[in-house]
Image: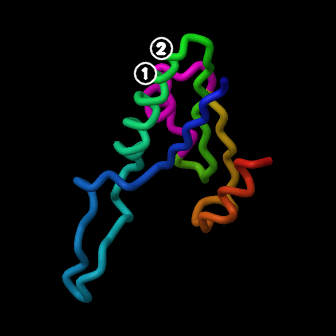
């Protein structure tokens, strides 16, 4: 059995600032990190693999340049997946969910 877990990069919440002028959020200085929920899902998939015995865990993501971060890849791989598939293209920087799903399905 192949277990696929998808993950995404999100802004690090400690780096998000509020613009005093209009009250909007400023993400310009926020580093990217892998969503904690997604890291938990990868760990859960690996636990399921241990229970099933004959399974393979694949972590997949589609996105922009934030996915080139080696720290993020190490963070994902340290959770135990057997394979990592990453599709990086600038057109996915602000992609809508349906575009991301189409790329992952291909």
- Residue 78 on image: x %, y %: 43, 21
Q: Mark 1 points at which residue?
A: 47
Q: Look at the numbered disc 1 and give the secondary structure of its residue.
A: helix
- Residue 71 on image: x %, y %: 44, 31
Looking at the image, residue 63 lies above or below residue 58: below
Q: Name the residue under label 2.
A: 50
Q: Seen in the image, is 8 located left or right of residue 88?
A: left
In front of the other: 9 or 2: 2
- What residue sits 43% from the left and 21% below the top? 47
Which span of residues is magenta-colored?
67-83
- Residue 2 on image: x %, y %: 66, 27
CA separation in Å, label 2 and label 1: 5 Å
Q: Are marks 2 and 1 in contact (CB under 8 Å)?
A: yes
Q: Residues within 10 Å of mark 1 (few under 14, many from 20)?
A: some
- What residue sits 52% from the left and 48% below the top? 66
- What residue sits 66% from the left and 23% below the top? 1
Q: Look at the numbered disc 2 and give the secondary structure of its residue.
A: helix
- What residue sits 32% from the left and 51% below the top? 12
Q: Specify the quadrant of the image occupied by residue 25.
A: bottom left
Asked if residue 58 is among those painted magenta in the image, a careful observer would answer: no
């Amino acid at each position: 059995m192949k277990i696929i877990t998808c993950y995404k990069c999100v802004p690090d919440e400690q780096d998000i600032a509020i613009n005093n002028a209009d009250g909007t959020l400023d993400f310009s200085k926020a580093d990217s990190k892998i969503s904690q929920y997604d890291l938990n899902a990868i760990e859960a998939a690996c636990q399921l693999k241990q229970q099933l015995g004959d399974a393979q865990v694949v972590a997949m993501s589609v996105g922009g340049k934030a996915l080139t971060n080696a720290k993020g890849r190490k963070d994902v791989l340290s959770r135990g997946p057997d394979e990592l598939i990453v599709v990086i293209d600038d057109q996915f920087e602000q992609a809508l969910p349906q575009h991301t799903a189409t790329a992952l399905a291909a």
